[in-house]
Image (cartoon, coloured by chain):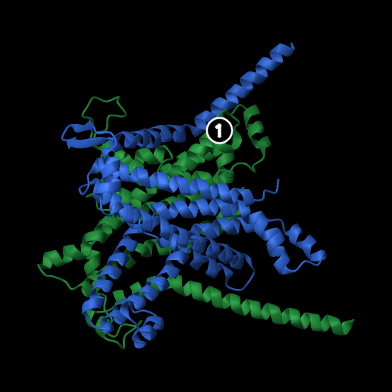
Chain colours: A green, B blue
């Protein structure tokens, strides 16, 4: 009996060692694939052009330089563009959070006719390609009449924050359908007794929601806020469509290398432009990397704990 | 008396419903004005010729001409449409399989799990459109420069893995070489498109009660059997969710050439109305694919309740 046991354990151990070896290999491989674009960007952003043609140089630049960063820092108008982007994304993410939290609560806690239909509408917003909506919306924002309330020709909202503010307020901003869809369960697990007690004490529905219920939903809310911040920061399509000419980071990054060439009155080689762009992209993603590193708990763990599934 | 109680209950229900509507009001308004209204407008636009003037726009009704133009006059649209759909069919299963097994891996206990998770979800954070755009244009210039310059420029610009160096050494025909390099870049495309799906699967894995596995262990089930009898069936609703998400994400992602094509045509090119008609054809195709896949998959989905 003892013999059998020990051999069984041996086999079992062998199996688990092999498995953990394979697992480590797979994880390392995938991590490499994910990190490689970041690492190549980092390494080539620190090179001079000659290093690109030097076949002995692969990852570590021979002529280490920060010139690419300096140039891009100036031509992306980094300080002001950074502040613009940060402020814009913060405000929009905050508004989206407010509207989405209300909708979570409404969908999770109240029974009413058409709540199923409402949920179907959420799914629909996820499925419609944004192009179908965004091009007519473009015209609506260009000649904004508040859907017929204001006299024609209406106000031109393009180039201002208003299109984004309106969409954020009405929970139809960037990927808001996704937030509603995967986090609609947020309030479901909370004890009803809390609400009832608050009601007995004379608090209105909205006050109950605001002071009693939302504190329990904070992990979900932080996650939602972070994701909408990041996605707003990364957005390029809507920003260029509704708000071209504002100096957000994604917009200045797009044209910085060419602007640089233009101010010097020179024609850059594609290689040099790619070096500059690599530096620019590093400057663009760096704030996000820092945010992700510091708040990783909220990006990953909270999603699991709050039970987005169900 | 009984009637009165009934009345009170009714009004309570009504108040409950009213509160529900009020909390959902932001979205209801948003849906009507920011989704439904432009949605209907887009149908109208696709049936009209649109002329933008300084004080508004004018519509000239031309029936289905825009659709006709999109399908039979425009040389590129049908080709891009077919290509996009075909690419979707090869892409979605890859993403799904990868994210499924990645989630199972990340759910196990091992050293450095947190770090692995951090890296696996990194693409969700770094998926900026502008970055993809610049990368893509770099890639394109690379492909163009390949015909003219020596292969030595190629390896250094991409600072590619030793794989491509090895391939260059083999002196393969250039077409084949491109195909392999693109295949390799596809792997990273798949991995980079899987972040949210992994997250959803991971959350699902953690919602499976541990007692099920314990009971299975007591009964002497192997890991293989556990996978087929417990993990897979309980995750199947999420497979459906993820299939839908992946298909949609693929069709509306900016790295999809169709999206660029539609936008350039709306502002110039074939014109706004034709672009609207193209978007609608595209949307209908996507919708049909979605409905069919949902029908097929939901037959095999297992629900615990």
Which quadrant: the N terminus of chain B? top right
* Residue sitting nearer the eye, B279 or B1: B279
SS class of the residue under badge 1? helix
Q: Please, is residue A259 above or below residue B289 in the view?
A: below
Residue at 50% x, 75% y is: A29
Q: Please, is residue A181 above or below residue A149 in the view?
A: below
Residue at 22% x, 36% y is: B50
Q: Residue furthest front?
A: B72
Task: Give the left or right position of residue A261, taking residue A207 as reference.
Answer: left
Badge 1: chain ID: A
Residue A218 in sight from this viewpoint: no
Q: Position of residue B304 (x, y in %)?
A: 70, 49
| Mark 1 surroundings within 10 Å by alpha-carbon count, few (fewer than 14), some (14 through 19), many (20 or more) | some
Residue at 51% x, 45% y is: B291
Q: Please, is residue A72 above or below residue A209 in the view?
A: below
Residue at 79% x, 60% y is: B215
Where on the picture, by quarter, is residue A186? Answer: top right
Q: Position of residue A193 (x, y in %)?
A: 68, 35
* Residue sitting nearer the eye, A207 or B208: B208
Where on the picture, by quarter, is residue B151? Answer: bottom left
Residue B227 in sight from this viewpoint: yes
Q: Please, is residue A283 above or below residue A188 in the view?
A: below
Q: Position of residue B113 (x, y in %)?
A: 58, 69
Which quadrant: the C terminus of chain B? top right
* Residue sitting nearer the eye, B136 or B274: B274
| Mark 1, residue position | A115
């Amino acid at each position: 009996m003892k013999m059998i046991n020990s051999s069984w354990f041996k086999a079992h151990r062998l199996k688990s060692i092999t498995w953990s070896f394979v697992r480590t290999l797979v994880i390392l491989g995938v991590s490499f694939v994910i990190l490689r674009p970041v690492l190549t960007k980092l390494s080539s952003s620190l090179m001079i052009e000659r290093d690109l043609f030097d076949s002995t140089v692969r990852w570590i630049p021979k002529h280490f330089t920060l010139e690419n960063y300096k140039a891009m820092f100036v031509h992306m108008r980094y300080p002001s563009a950074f502040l613009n982007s940060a402020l814009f994304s913060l405000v929009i993410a905050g508004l989206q959070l407010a509207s989405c939290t209300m909708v979570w609560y409404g969908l999770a806690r109240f029974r009413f006719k058409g709540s199923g239909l409402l949920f179907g509408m959420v799914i629909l917003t996820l499925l419609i390609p944004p192009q179908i909506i965004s091009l007519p919306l473009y015209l609506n924002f260009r000649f904004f009449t508040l859907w017929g309330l204001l006299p024609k020709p209406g106000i031109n909202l393009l180039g201002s924050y208003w299109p984004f503010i309106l969409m954020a307020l009405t929970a139809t901003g960037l990927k808001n359908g996704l937030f509603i869809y995967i986090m609609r369960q947020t309030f479901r697990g909370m004890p009803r007794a809390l609400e009832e007690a608050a009601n007995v004490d004379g608090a209105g529905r909205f006050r109950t929601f605001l002071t009693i219920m939302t504190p329990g939903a904070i992990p979900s809310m932080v996650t939602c806020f972070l994701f909408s911040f990041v996605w707003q920061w990364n957005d390029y399509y809507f920003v260029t469509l509704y708000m071209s000419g504002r100096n957000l980071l994604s917009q200045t990054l797009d044209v910085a290398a060419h602007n640089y060439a233009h101010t010097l009155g020179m024609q850059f080689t594609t290689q040099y432009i790619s070096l500059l762009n690599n530096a620019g992209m590093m400057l663009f993603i760096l704030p996000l990397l820092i945010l992700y590193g510091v708040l990783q708990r909220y990006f990953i763990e909270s999603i699991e704990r709050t039970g987005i599934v169900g | 008396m009984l009637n009165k109680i009934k009345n009170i209950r009714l009004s309570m229900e009504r108040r409950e419903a009213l509160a529900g509507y009020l909390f959902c009001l932001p979205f209801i308004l948003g849906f009507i004005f920011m989704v439904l209204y432009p949605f209907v407008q887009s149908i109208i636009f696709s049936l009209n010729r649109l002329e933008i003037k300084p004080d508004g726009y004018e519509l000239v009704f031309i029936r289905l001409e825009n659709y006709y133009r999109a399908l039979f006059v425009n040389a590129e649209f049908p080709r891009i449409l077919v290509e996009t759909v075909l690419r979707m069919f090869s892409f979605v299963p890859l993403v799904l399989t990868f994210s499924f097994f990645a989630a199972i891996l990340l759910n196990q206990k091992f050293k450095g799990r947190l770090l692995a998770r951090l890296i696996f979800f990194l693409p969700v954070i770094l998926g900026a459109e502008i970055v993809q755009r610049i990368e893509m244009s770099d890639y394109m210039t690379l492909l163009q420069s390949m015909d003219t310059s020596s292969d030595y420029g190629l390896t250094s610009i991409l600072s590619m893995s030793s794989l491509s160096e090895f391939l260059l050494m083999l002196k393969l025909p250039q077409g084949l070489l491109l195909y392999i390099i693109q295949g390799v870049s596809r792997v990273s495309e798949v991995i980079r498109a899987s972040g949210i799906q992994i997250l959803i699967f991971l959350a699902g894995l953690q919602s499976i009660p541990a007692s099920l596995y314990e009971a299975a262990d007591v009964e002497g089930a192997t890991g293989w059997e556990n996978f087929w009898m417990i993990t897979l069936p309980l995750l199947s609703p999420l497979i459906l969710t993820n299939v839908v998400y992946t298909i949609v994400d693929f069709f509306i992602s900016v790295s999809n050439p169709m999206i660029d094509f539609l936008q350039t045509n709306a502002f110039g090119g074939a014109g706004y109305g034709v672009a609207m008609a193209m978007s609608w054809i595209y949307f209908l195709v996507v919708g049909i694919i979605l409905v069919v896949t949902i029908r097929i998959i939901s037959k095999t989905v297992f629900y615990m309740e």
